Image: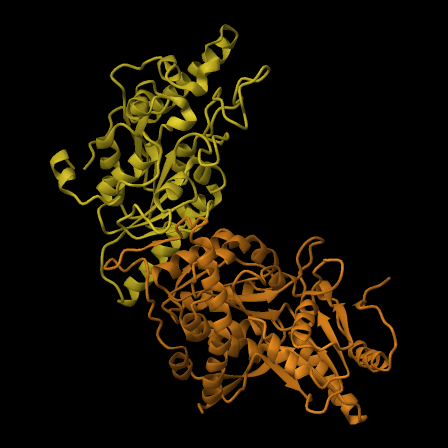
Amino acid sequence: MAKQDIVARTGNEAMAEAMRQINPDVVAAYPITPATEVVQIFASYVADGLVDTEFVPVESEHSAMSACIGSSAAGGRVMTGTSSQGLALMAEMVYIAAGLRLPIILADVNRALSSPINIHCDHSDTMMVRDSGWVQIFSENAQEAYDNMLQAVRIAETARIPVMVTTDGFIISHGMERIEILDDATAKAFVGVYKPKDYLLNFDRVLTLGAIDLQDYYFEHRMQLAEAMKNSKSVIMDVAKDYSKTAGRNYGLFELYKMEDAKFAIIAMGSTAGTTKFVIDGLRAKGLKVGLLKPRVFRPFPKDEIAAALKGLDAVAVMDRSDAVNGHEGPLAVEIKAALYDNGLNKPLINYIYGLGGREIKTEEIESIYSDLSEIAKGKKMDRVTYLGVRE
Amino acid sequence: MNVKEVVKQKELFTGGHRACAGCGAAIVARQVLMAAGPNTVVVSATGCLEVVSTIFPYTAWNVPFLHSAFENSGATICGVEALYKSWMRQGKYNKKVNFIAFGGDGGTYDIGLQSLSGAMERGHNILYVCYNNEAYMNTGVQRSGATPMGADTTTAPAGKVRQGKEQFRKDLTEIMVAHKIPYVAQAVVGNWRDLTSKVEKALAIEGPKFINVLQPCRLGWSYKPETTCEIGRLAAETCVWPLYEVTNGVYKISKPREKKPVLEWLQQQGRFRHLSKPENKPILDAIQANIDSNWQTLLAKEPPQAPKQP
């Protein structure tokens, strides 16, 4: 295992640091709060000659992803970063990047979507493109953001599918933490050299990319994307295993915290998982059998693995930091329910929609969820969906 | 480039594509690539050209080709060129490559204007070619910012109380000149020597270049398919579409021997048929007056003695 530096970094700095070590051929990006710093710091690396990257300061996020598509199709290792409205504006191209099977990496600093306009954290931006064909990896803190960025490159280039790595806006992106980083040589050796298979700048094999695909081929090509997404699960696990050998930090499709004997569990993504661990430690000290399942990989959704991990529980709470506005429940709850149904599990399950637009989630609120769960397990009826922390 | 050379070349935009008989866009693509040669990467906006030339699993392109979306061929070609620059700097690549983006007037004048402007302002070494057929032809002849006044389109139709498009088109060529890029030109389908020499000249210049090619569309303009090139030439001869280039800010105009009345051009096209009604005479007069005024404005931009081109 490589020796590592212990440094103080915000989430944005950690992501930019990983990008410096990855040294992509091209970065095309447009600023947006709270993701601006990722590309701003990276631009300073370019200005100081610390990377070989061609930095394209485009005039919009739509053009950012368009330029990334051009560079990636041409054969390069390509990255960008954005948030919220930026991701919304580039959404058309997000889908096209996946359809073209381009291994682009996107740092997505989670922020609420307008309207009303808001610059703070929730996961609605990532959720908006959850069906775009991108691998989606959530980070709990700056350390995970750094580690996930390095792993994303290998995942994307092996599975031939783009990957977005998220952090919670401001909470992680601007929060200073103690993190461990690999030395440059080790990080570079881990990500390796990208050797594209087919690419535009290869004049020995002239390609037409982005052809029009009608009734006779479109379906087959979309099926190939679906297969690539399914197959990316084992790629993610292989890369995590290798990363564990390199960095000594273990990653999987999700993390289980004190779940061995747990009766009640919360399922939460991003920084709230960290807060929940703190609450669990307190409740465990009082003898309560509580635990956490933190999905790391939202796409592909590891439904059978998650269902297996929930098997022994008496009741489950799913925390959604975004609202699907579908008249019933949040996007993570929908996935979890489908996972349970497919595995023949009918568990008491309640969904909490919380933290929209950066509304703080308090430890007392998380404690109250665990007490709700014990009541539900005893047969108490509750609303299936609760908007937690909202003023009535 | 002469005819003898041209016929010996490998076709880089081949036949067998699905364009309409008499399609001007296919002529633009073929002639631009004749001038550019095989070491060229092409990006195209969504539109007629991309649709007719890339129906999977076929392709008409014998050069590397990428299409991603409608409003972004400016940004997409920048991405390809940026990677090229990055690889050249890193010593990973050593071939001389041309970067050409195609867009129709929809993808260039309207929905793609922001992406085009950004690409030009950032100074990428690219050539953007607009195949301007003056309406959204791929979706069935809707008006665009390039549609001329009086033209009948499906979203500004000639009816009982309205007589087609009521506005003059925007002058995108001059918008590009205002970007102070090293080379901007107007060309037409029907004058291959002018178009190919402009492409050759553009590609010899480092930096962003823009050529606006007026492209008659037999479907949307409604004329006999065999007259595409004739109608293109007539656009130049009537000064509807003057042939000129602006190299580092210096204008050079290819003036017609005799400036013909616009009516000669309008009469050949079904999209202007309604203008022949006597009550629409004021519209015809307004069109002619506009062309005359634009022509005078353009002539005034040319230096009194055009400097000899090197």
Residue A2: give x, y in percent of width and height. Answer: 44, 90
Chain in orange in the render: A
* B279 on left or right of B233: right
Residue in the foreground of this view, choosing between B56 and A26: B56
Residue A56 location (% of width, % of height): 42, 57
What is the total number of numbered labels drawn onto the structure image?
0
Asked whether the viewer can see residue B61, the reply is: yes
Residue B290: in sight, yes or no?
Answer: no
**B104 vs B241, nearest the viewer:** B104
Does residue B268 lie above or below B45 as drawn? above
In the image: residue A258, left or right of residue A181: right
Q: How is the image coloured?
A: by chain
Q: Is residue A287 left or right of residue A332?
A: right
Q: Is residue A220 above or below residue B49?
A: below
Taking the image as shown, residue B233 lies to the left or right of residue A269, namely left
Quadrant hosting residue A297: bottom right
Q: Position of residue B257 (x, y in %)?
A: 24, 16
Q: Is residue B34 above or below residue B140?
A: below
**Which quadrant of the figure contains the C terminus of chain B?**
top left
Asked if residue A126 is positioned above or below residue B161 in the image, the reply reads: below
* Position in image of residue B217 (x %, y %): 38, 29
Chain painted yellow? B
Residue A48 sits in which quadrant? bottom left
- Quarter of the image with the N terminus of chain B is top left
Q: Residue furthest top?
A: B278
